[in-house]
Amino acid sequence: MSSVMSTDGIYKQATLFSDRIGDIRQILLPIAGTWYHAVYAMFQNEQLKINGAQQLSEVMQTYADVVQQVMSSDVAVRGEHHESIATLHSKLKKAQTNTKRLAELTSSALDQPDKLEGPCILWALSIQVLLNSLDKILGAEVLSRPGQSIRHQVTPQKRLAAMSENSLRIQEAARLTSSHCKNHINVQKMTALQEEVKAFTEAYLQAADDLGTVPLSGVHQLAKSEVLQRQLLIKMKVLSGIISKINKEYTDSLQNVICLAVSVATIDSKDHEKMEEVRANFERDAESLLGNVKTATQSVQDCLSYVRDPRIRANLRSINEHLSFQMSDILSRARQMVETQDIGDMPNVEIQTQYWSAKAHFLVAEIDRMEGIHLATKQVVRLSLQGKHTSKTQDTISEFLPNQKGVIHPDSAIGSGQANHPTGPKATEQDTQSPPLPKQEIKMGGRGITTSRGAPSLTYTSLFLKRETDKWDPQNNRIIQVTRDMAEKIYHMTQYLRKKGPIQSKEAFVTTAKDVVTSCKSVTQFVRVIAAYCLDESCREDLSLIVDQILTVTNQLTIISSVNALTPGSKSSDEILVKNAQNLLQIVLQGVRAAETACIKGLRQPEPNSDGAEAAAMCFQWKQNLIIHRAQQYSNPETDDLGLRKTALHPAAPSLAPPIKVQDTFK
């Protein structure tokens, strides 16, 4: 071989190697990324390259501290990441070695920056490899298949937004979990970590904001931003691990569904049979879990009326409304991973899972604390949010129900759950008082003619009762229907004393009195049910006393009507019968008023589908109407925009029965 040919061959090989080096450089530069541009620009700056070696040493010392923090922290690591932890220290050593070599070259080649390009690329790659290893451990980078990493190509703004949202979620999850955790050590840990997460989040966002305003030569600023991001991830990971242990019962079922989604996304696409089997299991478990959550949220919604504190009730309603929405969002993200075969969203899904489980556990703990909620409802909510509520567990729930011997269940239904507003003429405050007195009444007594002022006659009182009850809409309200029916019958009995009205015989008169007693039974049962489920002791005593009074007066009315049926006609005995009937109606209205007070004070949740539940539903519907009425009053003052007093007063507040006071004596 001639020397000329040898020179040509060497030239060709050198050209080929040069092209390959250029191609490799084009491949490595995007991977080295910002780190290469920052360090290379630093050595081109006359002012910064003097202290370049010192700056590189400080950067590596910072990353060494982060690695030490990871290795000493209680970070939950999964199987495929275990090798990353084992090799993390060796990657740190390689980065430190490359840093040392680059620092030595900078001192000997200050005037030849071209010689630093290769070492700068190598240093930037070693830093990026170290960061990737940290991200795998902390869950910021996931593996789709063995050896294949997936990193979402997101803009810095979206990355900052995701980090900020996840930080807020994990802080709120820690706050909710700490509120019911009985382990004081864990509470102290979560409180301290929550403060650290908040501090690191603010520092990271500030560093990221400053990074956009400094030149590319700011290696220190770039390192600060990256270090703060990993330190924030470490604290979030440790805090998430503690929260996961405390809320494990509420996390397991959801994590099982997510694991199925990850399995579908990571199974070899050639294994169609296995993929379809896992996909079917995922869809089945996801639908079951979502159904359980909807069952729980509906049960909570039904029992919120029995929570006496309005602030606690509003807070629980807000959390309850968000549970179904958040579960749907998590399952939607899981389905997206299945469809796209991309599990890059796993870090966000894991944080949302911890946030949801913390909310679910907090909701169950608060419901358990409530005095008036039925044990069966509490158990349904607990098992449903844990993903364990099925048709088979319904029998198990009955074991938690105590034998409530003191609870009285009416024989007949109370009525619909709708409360009613006055209809017809608007009720005013005068309507709630005693009937207006006639100017003068002349009566024949044993001592001659007497004039009476201040005591209405039997006829006038009965007519007043009837007119007042006619103002109320009896539709879908058993209590209003019974009250109106009693007032109608008592008015007919009063007309009979004057030889008027539909009652034409003494037998019909006595039968009507007995019908009043029969009609009163449903109202008596209603008052008895409210007394049984009332939480306030004084209200319970008042209701029980009223029930006793109703029973006493009904017994008297039954005896008087029976005696009256067997004796010859007597106007005085007939008047006594009418007076007793009016007294009975007065006590009945007092009982309904006392039931309204008990509803305001708070009721204990009755058993589902019982008469107690029906009566409580009617009371709470009335209470809701009362709240609306008060809001309308506040928004509709007594004066108009010009300051003039309005002639029409506010409508009377909604009630379960007409607000009537009957005179104690009748003449």
Image: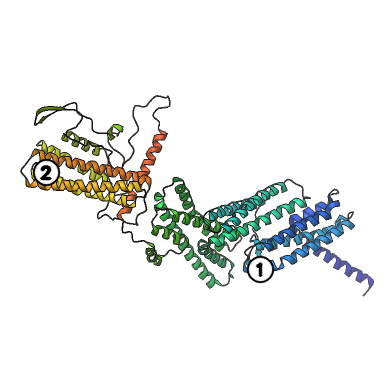
Residue 213 image position (x, y, % from top left): 73, 45
Q: Are the two marked residues, 2 and 1, in contact with CB atoms closer than 8 angstroms?
A: no
Please name the amino acid that badge 1 sits on.
His
Provide the residue designation for mark 1: 82
Of residue 488 and residue 399, the one placed in the foreground of this image is 399
268 left or right of 485?
right
Q: Is residue 165 visible?
A: yes
Of residue 5 and residue 49, the one placed in the foreground of this image is 49
Q: Is residue 150 visible?
A: no
Residue 323 image position (x, y, % from top left): 49, 54
Provide the residue designation for mark 2: 509
- Note whether 614 is above or below 3 in the view shown: above
Residue count near mark 1 (Cα–Cα under 10 Å), binned few <14, some 14–19, many ≥20:
few
117 left or right of 323?
right
Residue 329 image position (x, y, % from top left): 52, 56
- Note whether 141 is above or below 50 in the view shown: below
Query: Residue extending furthest left?
Result: 568
Distance of label 2 from label 1 (alpha carbons): 92 Å
Q: Secondary structure at mark 1?
A: helix
Please report the residue visible at 81 percent of the width from the left and 58 percent of the height from the top: 120
First in residue order: circle 2 vs circle 1: 1
Residue 334 image position (x, y, % from top left): 54, 61
69 left or right of 476?
right
- Note whether 326 is above or below 390 in the view shown: above
Q: Secondary structure at mark 2?
A: helix
Please name the amino acid that badge 2 sits on.
Phe
Specify the quadrant that holds the C terminus. top left
Query: Residue extending furthest right?
Result: 3
